[in-house]
Image (cartoon, helix red, strand yellow):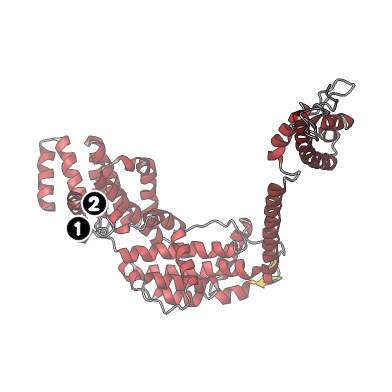
Amino acid sequence: MVDLVERTYAFYTRINKPKYLARLAIRLLEHLYYKRDEKNERLDYIGKLSQLIYSHGDERLKTRAALCHIYSSALHDKFYEARDMMLMSHLQESVAQADIPTQILFNRTMVQLGLCAFRLGLIPEAHSCLAEIYAGGRVKELLAQGLASARFSEKNVEQEKLEKRRQVPYHMHINLELLECVHLFSAMLLEVPNMAANAFDVKRKVISRPYRRLLDFFDRQVFTGPPENTRDFVVHAGKALSSGDWQKCADLLLNLPAWNLMPNHEHVKALVKRKIQEEGLRTHLFTFGSFYDSLSLKDLCDLFNLTPNTVHSLVSKMIINEELHASWDQPTGSIVMHKVEPTRLQALALQLSEKANQSVEHNERLLDTRTGGYGQHKFEGKVQGGKERFQRGGRGGGGSRFRQDREHHGEGQGDKQGRRPNTRGGRNQSERGDYEHREHREHREHREYREYRGQGQNQGERNQRYERGGRGGRGGQGGQNRYGQRDA
């Protein structure tokens, strides 16, 4: 097939038909981009075909050619070149509007970029490339290497046929076990030191939610047996690394058969072991650094089997990034720890005090809501409305007395200097800066309002009885009117 396309490509090159050459070039690219070549001759040929498509192809052909070129560069461990091409093309911004085969090719390219970054030891870059693919839990569908379970799908027969036609051939598959191993291992190296550094922070950030869910599920288990699959091995290794046992973590991960699927797997295994040692050192300093006054450089080198230059570089970087509050003592070759961060007991005491304070504030708000306390400003409108009704006469004639008391206290009218009258009660004291007296005044007026409201209701009932004929009830004779005067 490739030989036939190459001969056709040579024929159209002789007759100089650029439009047909671009179509033939994309066919050649789709048959060659996923194959690895140790001599890099095929990579140069793919670059020439891509340049031809960039010059004479339409938008869809240009997009697919760029993705094939990036995939091939990542496959040959040229990460920075492939990353720059991806960023300059802005494909991650426009791929959502592309057709489904192009989106599948984009997903395959991002996965290959992540694997390339991992082979070069760029753990954060590898995790960022693979995190989006694993976020939804539909890796097979996104890579077109399998179908979703028909039990939970809502697709009809035609949609299932179209999805089967879009499946990638088996010889083009990316090993899913290797992909899961790389993703979980990258997440472990980033998440375990992050958890140790923010162990007592309530709002600590989460780098990898899938790995954090696996750890939470592992902690909830009553009985945990030996690891059986790749996921179990990585979770057990993460728990060992968090306790400072880097040797057990390395033994669990280096025995995984997935590493043998990578090119130059011996170099990859050495890289995995070195990364475990470095992150084990960081986790140890985060977890147990507060218990030391000083740490010897030689002891750290012996504990994690690292060179002095590597340990010095890692600790210095942590000090510069303010992750570790310490300083170097060069004459003795030791790290002097600064007692800035709280101990575990102190951090737990701070958390307890914060939660107790929140509980007290919540209870106070509930109590004010039930009793109408002076601290509830949302009830000021209701209290003000009741005061205005009693100023106008109220429900039973008790408003005049309430208004007289307000005038006695200097409220409801302006002072002699012509300032604005105070209608909410206690604001003159607020203007003088006496906040406690203002709150006490509002509470007293609210209590008086409730008392006068009850007196007004009783007085109104008595007025109604006097208007109907007095207390004796003898046809209205000898009774009093609503103003307390005898009727004629």
- Relative depth, front residue between 328 and 262: 262
Task: Specify the quadrant of the image occupied by residue 91.
Answer: top left
- Is disc 1 surrounded by few (<14), some (14 to 19) or many (20+) residues within 10 Å? few
Q: Secondary structure at mark 2?
A: loop
Q: Residue at x 35, y 41 (%)?
A: 89
Residue 234 position by quadrant? bottom left
Q: Earlier in the sequence, mark 1 or mark 2?
A: 2
> Disc 2 residue type?
Lys
Residue 415: x and y in percent read 88, 24
Which residue lies under the disc numbered 1?
169
Inspect the image, locate mark 1, and give the three-letter code of the amino acid beneath it.
Pro
Q: What is the number of the mark on residue 68?
A: none
- 10 Å neighbourhood of mark 2: few (<14), some, or many (≥20)? few
The quarter holding residue 324 reads: bottom right
Q: Is residue 329 visible?
A: no
* Percent coordinates x, y for residue 32 in the rendering: 21, 53
Residue 407 to residue 41: above or below? above
- The residue that mark 2 highlights is 155
Give residue 314's position: percent from left, percent from top.
57, 63
Q: Residue 253 placed where, x, y %? A: 42, 73
Q: Residue at 38% of width from left, 49% of height from top? A: 83
Above or below, 441 against 119 in this view is above
Q: Quadrant of the C terminus?
A: top right
Residue at point 41% right, 72% down? 232
